[in-house]
Image (cartoon, grey):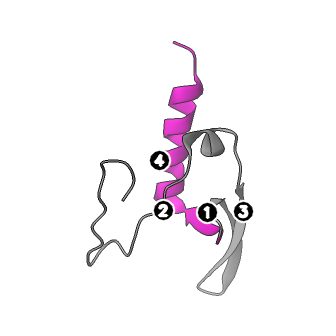
Amino acid sequence: MRGDIASAPNHEVAGTLWVPFRTLARGDGKGTFEFTWEGKTMDLPCIRIGPEKHVLWGMKCRRLETMLEAYSTPS
């Protein structure tokens, strides 16, 4: 639990990881990871977060990047 927000893992969510917004806004952990699909290896964009360096990639990574871009753009 963080503050007054409780997390409840279920069949879709194994757990939660709390990361300070400023850490993400600075671009900490931004990079690529190697992904192999049908015999082809690709370097895909990702964000490594938390002490264990969990890899956030794909649609979740893009959504987070979009949100960070929106918050960093002056109105």
Badge 1 density bin: few <14, some 14–19, many ≥20, Cα 10 Å: few
Q: Secondary structure at mark 3?
A: strand
Residues marked 2 and 1 touching at CB (< 8 Å): yes
Taking the spot 39% from the left edge, 71% from the top edge, the residue there is 15
Mark 1: amino acid: Gly
Residue 40 coordinates in the image, percent (x, y):
67, 81
Tag on residue 50?
1
Badge 2 density bin: few <14, some 14–19, many ≥20, Cα 10 Å: few
Q: Nearer the viewer, mark 3 or mark 2?
A: 2
The span shown in magenta is 52-75
Badge 4 density bin: few <14, some 14–19, many ≥20, Cα 10 Å: few
Apparent side of residue 6 relative to residue 26 in the rendered image (left or right): left
Mark 3: amino acid: Thr
Badge 3 density bin: few <14, some 14–19, many ≥20, Cα 10 Å: some
Tag on residue 5?
none
Q: Secondary structure at mark 2?
A: loop
Q: Nearer the viewer, residue 2 or 25?
A: 2
Examine the image and state in which quarter residue 48 appears: bottom right
> Mark 2 = which residue?
17
- Disc 3 from disc 2: Cα separation: 20 Å
Taking the spot 61% from the left edge, 63% from the top edge, the residue there is 50
Residue 66 coordinates in the image, percent (x, y):
51, 39
Residue 36 coordinates in the image, percent (x, y):
64, 81
- Disc 4 from disc 2: Cα separation: 16 Å
Q: Decide which of tag 4 and tag 3 comes sooner along the chain.
A: 3
Q: Nearer the viewer, mark 3 or mark 1?
A: 1
> Mark 3 = which residue?
32
